[in-house]
Amino acid sequence: MNISDKDRTQKEIREYNLKVFKLSYEAINCLKQGELDPFSIMEKELEKIRKKGKQPIIIIDELQALQDIYMNGQRELIKELFNFFVAMTKESHLCHFLISSSDGYFIERVYNDSKLTKTSELLEVDYLNKEDVFYWLSHLEKESDIENFSLTDRQIEKIWYYFGGSVWEISAFLSKLLRNSENGGVADYILEKEAAREITAYKVRFNDFYAGYHEHRVRLLERANACFEKSGKVVLKDMNPLIKKGLFSSDSLQEELGILVRDNLFSFNPVTGEYKPQGHSAALGLLEYCRNVPEF
């Protein structure tokens, strides 16, 4: 928060700049003491902005971080927020809200719980496509300000194979390659060695942080991997054999898949109901894991 002091010779007036609007120091104190409703204050501030002919757009990233937070120990913050979003958009038309989350299960829950199906649209933000990745990695100086370093076509193909269109993973991988570069490039064996370490890290996550020696989880990963290799995705009906074997109930199966989504090992699209590996590296790590599953 930025605090600005005005008119130091007279009564001190302090404002908290919340980017979308400003709140007075007195209003903040009343909020802390529970004398004012924060949603009423925000609505009044949004009305002021609209009267100026502006259309506010509020963006909230990784909203799942607010899970399990309650107002005054009773009202769940997430539900109160979404009730407010609906009131400000559908009813008052005061602003637009863009809400993002990397947790597809969380998005599905708030979407259904808040009855947003008639008031909002779910949009999937996916990785870059192959064409964009190849253009980026072929123009590193222009697109990433990386000078005197280039990749061969074969190396770009390998990076796509290992990381797909994951911008963060590719950027981090480029940093590792730069540290090992010589004469404006990097040796193929170094690229393969560094990529293999990333895939092994995912293999370890599937084993150590999820499945371990729990047979039902091991079988779930085996089944999911078989589906991923065949069609690139999993829907619930694909996992029915696990239920028939008595390894899961329908509820416990969804709970386990939810754990994989929240741990960023799988992704979930609430519109299509499809589960996928969290990118190429996760898919390759799962494949490596399934080649050496523990015996029971």
Image: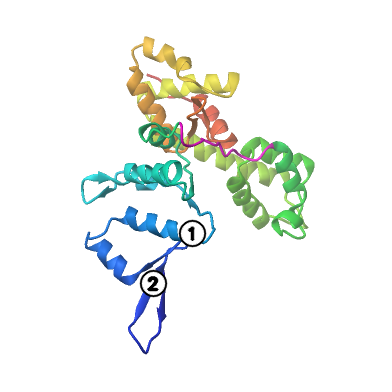
Q: Crowdedness of circle 2 by 10 Å Cα count: few (<14), some, many (20+)?
A: some
- Marks 1 and 2, Cα distance to the nearest angstrom? 20 Å
Q: Earlier in the sequence, mark 1 or mark 2?
A: 2
Quick one: 44 or 196, which is closer to the camera? 44
Q: Is residue 251 magenta?
A: no
Quick one: 155 or 260, which is closer to the camera? 260
Q: Which residue is mark 2?
A: 15
Residue 6 location, quadrant: bottom left
Percent across and percent down for residue 102 are 48, 41
SS at mark 2 in the image: strand
Percent across and percent down for residue 32 are 25, 63
Range of residues picked out in magenta: 118-129
Q: Main secondary structure of the magenta part?
A: loop
Say what amino acid the circle numbered 1 marks.
Lys
Q: Nearer the viewer, mark 1 or mark 2?
A: 1
Q: Give residue 51's mark.
A: 1
Q: Farthest residue toward the bottom?
A: 9
Q: Is residue 168 above or below residue 124?
A: below
